[in-house]
Amino acid sequence: MEPGLIEGKIRSRRRYSVKWTEYPKEILPAWIADMDFGIPPLVKEGLAEAIELSETGYAPRQMTLDYLEAFSRWQLEEHQVSMDASEMIALTDVIQGFYLSIESLCAKDAGVLFLTPSYPPFFSSVQATNRKVLTSELVLHDRRYEIDFDDFAKKAEKASPGGAILLCNPQNPTGRVFGIGELESIAQIALANDLWIISDEIHADLCYQGSIHTPIMSIAPEVAMKTVTLSSASKSFNLAGLHTAVLHAGSAEILSRLESIPQGLRGSPGSLGLLAGQIAFSSSTQWLKEMLRKLDANRKLFFELLEPYRDKVRSEMPEATYLAWLDFSQSPLKPTAQQHLLKHGNIALNPGEAFIEGGTDFSRLNFATEAELIPEMVQRIVSCLRN
Ligand SMILES: Cc1ncc(COP(=O)(O)O)c(C=O)c1O
C-alpha cells in the first residue's frame, strides 16, 4: 500500500471521529459503524449555511415536522410503506428508541427476545431496563444465516406476557435481509404470544442488489398495530454524530404509551441533526446510490481476497450493511480474535464476544472505507492466521 495513504488521505481529516482517533497510528481502524465517504454535498451545504448564519439556537417545531415528513416520503418512495409523520417521534438516537419502547411498552418482568449474534446495545438496553434477555442464535445454512424458528418460537413463549421481539433488519452483524416469509413467521410468533415488535431498521437503505428491505409493519395491519419502527439517516448518510433518529408507532396506543414518558426524559434532537436528516431524506438518493456502488465494490473485493483462507477464517457476504462477521473458530486466535488481530495484525475490529455470549472466536469488520484499504485489511488479517 502507498505509504502515508492512511495518514494523509483519511486520518488527518477524521479528527472528530472515534473510529479514527481511538487507536494509535499503526492500527488500521475497521470497527465502529462509521463510513469514510463524507456526507452528501447538499447536506454539507445546508449545514455550512446554518453555521455561517450562527443558526445554532433551539429548533422550531417546524424543523421537527419537516424532518419527520421527509422521512415519511422517503419510506414511501424507497420502501413502499406508508408512515404518517403524525405517528412519529423524533429522537436523538435509535438506541434511545430501544430504551423508550421497552420501558413504555413491556411489562416489568417480561422478556425481550432477539437474534444473536446481535448489535451489542440490544443486550445492554434489555438489561438496563431490567427485562429478561432472551436470545435465539442464527444458524448457518448453505452459507446464509437463518432463523431457527423452532427455537425462536420457544423463546418467544418465555417473553410472554407483555414482552417484545427486538428485531434488527437488516441484521447487524450478519448483514442478513429478512425476506417476507421470514418476517411473516416472526410476526405470527409475535402475535401468537401477544408480543410487541420493536424493529430497528437503521440499515434498511443499505441493501445490495438482489435483496429488498421490507418494513415488518407493512406485513399486515394487525402486525403494524404491535410494531415500533426505528430508523435514522445516520447510517445511510453518515450523520451519526448529529444524533437524530425517528420512531414510528404502529398504533395510537403505542404512540400514547411512548408519549407518557415525559418529553424531558425523552429528550429531543438538535437543529443541525434535524436539518441534515431532512436534507438527506429529501435530496440525496443519487449520493446514496453512488455510495452503495462503492460499498458493493469493497464488499466483493474483500470477500474475493478472503476466500482462499476460508479454512481458517469464514465469513458470508452480507446482503446489506457495510459489516462483515468473521469466524476464526477453525483456527482460533488467542486470547480472543479481536485482541489478537489488534496486537499482531495492527487492525481494530469489534470483539465477537460483545455480539454473542462466548463469541471470542468472532470479530466484526467495517469495510466502508477507501477501496485501497481493502487489500490492506485482508493482508493484516491473513498475517495473523497460523499456517
Ligand atoms: C443496528 C443498529 N442500530 C442502531 C445503531 C445506532 O444508531 P444510533 O446512533 O442512532 O443510536 C447502529 C449503529 O451502528 C446499528 O448498527
Image (cartoon, rainbow, N blue to C red):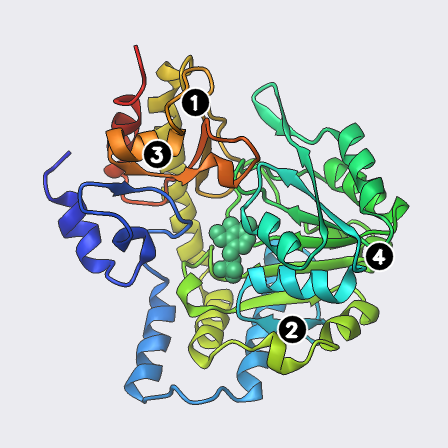
Question: Residue 34: x, y in percent?
Answer: 39, 52
- Mark whose residue sits in front, 2 or 4: 2
> Quarter-wise, where is residue 196 in the image?
bottom right
**Residue 377 in sight from this viewpoint:** yes
- Mark whose residue sits in front, 1 or 2: 1
Left or right: residue 252 versus residue 172 is right
Question: Residue 117: x, y in percent?
Answer: 57, 36
| N-term mark: 1 or 4 | 4
Give the labeled residue for mark 2. 89
How many residues crowd mark 1 within 10 Å: few (<14), some (14–19), many (20+)?
many
Total numbered labels placed on residues in the image:
4
Provide the secondary structure element on which disc 2 rests.
Answer: strand
| N-term mark: 3 or 2 | 2
Question: Where 181 sits versus 195, above or below?
Answer: above
- Mark whose residue sits in front, 3 or 4: 3
Residue drawn where x is 39% and y is 49% of the image: 291
How many residues crowd mark 2 within 10 Å: few (<14), some (14–19), many (20+)?
many
| N-term mark: 1 or 2 | 2
- Mark whose residue sits in front, 1 or 4: 1
Give residue 221's mark. 4
Give residue 78's mark. none
Question: Residue 365: x, y in percent?
Answer: 40, 37
Give the labeled residue for mark 3. 339
Q: Marks 1 and 3, how far apart in space?
A: 12 Å
Q: Marks 1 and 4, how far apart in space?
A: 43 Å
- Mark whose residue sits in front, 1 or 3: 3
Question: Where 18 sits versus 47, above or below?
Answer: above
Q: Amino acid at mark 4?
A: Pro
Of residues 280 and 285, the one nearer the viewer is 280
